[in-house]
Amino acid sequence: MFRVPMCVLTDAGPARVTGGHAVDRYVQIGSLTKTLTGTVLTRMAEAGAIGLDDPVERWLPAPSGTGITLLDLARHTSGLPRLPPGLGRRDPYAAFGPAELLRLVRGLDTVAVRPPGEEEYSNLGYSVLGAALAAAGGAGYEELLDTYVLRPAGLTEVTARPHPGRRLLAPGLPGTRRRPWTMDGAILPAGGLWATPRAVAALVVRLLVERRLGEPAVSWQSAGPLRWHNGATRDASVFAGAMEDGRWVVVHRLNGRAEDTDRAAVELLRRER
């Protein structure tokens, strides 16, 4: 059984770390990346650089008439499958690069598993969305993220490629660390970012509580007064959310089940009413 390092940050007090976790080391945040990608979409639309209802084929070489809009991609109503087909098992996204994404985009009408408008949580959809944003903005995803979200919100310590010496990896066998998934290719806009836990806390406060960039993007999930999103890779999981009254929580764990990370975060919010 591997250790399960955990980092907890809330509005109620100082950070709590156990098992060798740290607030200032970079960790994978998985699908929490989607909230930043969705915010790029919202900000670009507000700037007139892109339209929320633009069809995918306006910006990418997808077949005409798919009925899929950029907003569909952000809302998980594109009908695209959860994962790109043909992924490996050991490091599933390592070989999913721009060329592989382009091939899928060109046959997007045959890849969909549901009609547009029906909900289907899709990492592939966010990969397509990231590519459309890059095409519309004339810049790479990371540059757009910095221009439209990170710098305007004053966020730092968020990146696709942290220095190896600042990464915090899950502990494996005694004296070893587990190798993380490779997620800096086409899957990046769906789940490939790294951040320090304190940066995730700042993200929650500035985007959800203070709303420095306006209303939260549609990428955030809602449950009553709670806006939240989670994320998981093979060896890391995170839950980040805020209540309408300003209470917020971030829980990041290495190893362990992602469901337990979610449960711990929600329980903290319940206790601190």
Image (spheres, rainbow, N blue to C red):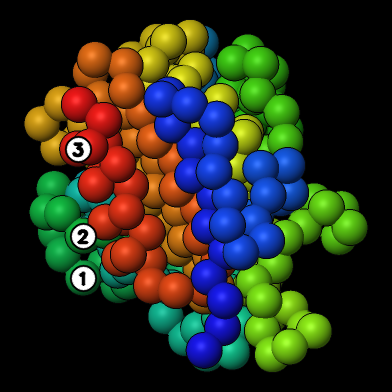
Residue at left 21%, top 31%?
Answer: 226
Percent of width and height locating residue 94: 66, 76
The percent position of residue 159, horizontal first and vertical second, equals 71, 43
The residue depicted at 46 percent of the width and 21 percent of the height is: 205
Bin the neighbour count of mark 3 within 10 Å (Cα to Cα): few under 14, some 14-19, many 20 and up: few
- Whether residue 191 is visible here, answered yes or no, is no
Residue 191, relative to residue 108: is it above or below?
A: above
Residue nearest the observer in this picture, 64 or 20: 20
Quadrant of the frame with the C terminus: top left
Question: With respect to residue 33, does 86 lie above or below?
Answer: below
Under mark 1, the amino acid is: Val
Quadrant for residue 183, please give it: bottom right
Under mark 2, the amino acid is Glu
Query: Which residue in the protein does label 3 denote?
Result: 270
Q: Residues within 10 Å of mark 1 (few under 14, many from 20)?
A: some
First of labels 3, 2 by sequence position:
2
Verify CB contact (< 8 Å) between mark 1 and mark 2. Answer: yes
Residue carrying label 2: 120
Give the secondary structure at mark 1: loop
Q: CA distance from mark 1 to mark 2?
A: 8 Å
Q: CA distance from mark 3 to mark 1?
A: 37 Å
The residue lying at 69 percent from left, 90 percent from top is 173
Does residue 211 appear anywhere in the picture?
yes
SS for callout 3? helix
Circle number at residue 113 = 1
Say which quarter of the image contains residue 247.
top left
Q: Closest to the observer: 194 or 251?
A: 251
Looking at the image, do the residues carrying marks 3 and 2 touch, with CB atoms under 8 Å apart?
no
Where residue 202 appears, as percent x and y from the top left, is: 56, 25
